[in-house]
Image (spheres, rainbow, N blue to C red):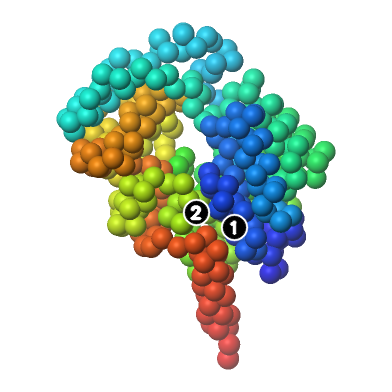
Amino acid sequence: MKSPICDKLGIEFPLIAFTHCRDVVVEVSKAGGMGVLGAAGYDAESLEIELNWIDEHIEGKPYGVDLIAPTSMAVTDDNISEAEIREMVGEEQKNFAASVLARHQIDTADVYQQKSRIAGGFLTSSRATNIIDVAFSHPIKLIANALGVPPRYMLEMGKLNNVAVAALVGAKEHAVKQVEAGVDILVVAGTEAGGHCGEVSTLVLVPEVCEAVEQYDVPVLAAGGIVTGRQMAACMAMGAAGAWTGSMWLTTSEAETSPIIKDKYIAASSRQTVRSKARTGKYSRQLRSAWTDAWESDEAPEPLPMPLQTLVSEAPLAKITKLAEGGHSGAKQLATFFVGQGVGLMNSVQSTKQVVYEFMEDYIKAADRLAGTMED
């Protein structure tokens, strides 16, 4: 297929799949797109294990890695001790989280006994270099930073190793800063996207960014709510060179998504997501549930800034998911996870390969329809 993304990454079809599941990475790349492993939460040793497995199974096809190294956080475990950071987590927020669980008949005595990592899945500067080195020790073709301008070291290593460096943006002004910093690919994510997202819709943001960076030779990948080939075709008509997708892989048969969450996705409509700071301290889109409703209520305290809010939410949500999988009715009501508004189009569990092929067929039909509008 003709696309600067295909040329730059050495792939057949400009469909990029962000996923935390190594099996999905492999299957998408083998089907002609590119799988990108979400490496948030890995340390250097565990990432090495995952990438070795991918190398052994991907048959030489291109793949990438996605990291979360925010430009700024309120505090990090680089500049303040772990004990001091934990003391900054307000009892008001923790008590409220515990009260939500208690109202759904969940014992809260041990919720905060297991200590979460301070930065959650975010890389502080002391961790970032080691993780980046592991990624570049493997034959990756793309490395992406999900929040803010990529670390200078990542950009330098990308140039040195001929690996494309991508960055996710949710606003025009951020896109300009990214290309000026030297990124090779922009992932332009509308508010429909799952996880961290901005306020502007994909339909508006993609052409806005394409126009703003037209003078730069930087291709744009459209993201945010994209689940079908016709949506990618629409975005390419607006100037994008392909699509970056995430949510659609959560309901594949290979995905490691909790069965409870997967069932909720299949049943959900596009209206059943919420954009909230209550999970990480920055706005992120997730499946609406009794948990998200509680945090959006008038009685809820203000979420803490990143990464402190993660220390409030991570432990309760982990317990909720575990109990829900065991059949706990209250936990089932509370269970939630990141997902975009495209969830309303995710109506069945299919193999990753089948999802890719159906996406390609849908794109071809849409492209033909668009071409047909110019016929005499």
Image position, residue 24 (x, y; %): 55, 53
Q: From the viewer's perspective, is residue 175 above or below residue 316?
A: below
Residue at 43%, 46% in the rendered image: 257
Image position, residue 213 (x, y; %): 66, 50
Category of crowding for the residue at label 2, using alpha-carbon neighbours closer than 10 angstroms: few (below 14), some (14–19), many (at least 20): some
Quadrant for residue 238, please give it: bottom right
Residue 254, numbered circle: 2
Residue at 65%, 60% in the rendered image: 30
Residue type (three-letter) at the residue carrying disc 2: Glu
Residue at 64%, 37% in the rendered image: 49
Q: Mark 1 and 2 residues: CB-CB less than 8 Å, in contact?
A: yes
Mark 1 lies on a secondary structure that is: helix
Answer left or right for 7 relative to 50. Answer: right
Residue type (three-letter) at the residue carrying disc 1: Glu
Residue bearing the label numbered 1: 27
Residue 11, numbered circle: none
Residue at 65%, 44% in the rendered image: 53
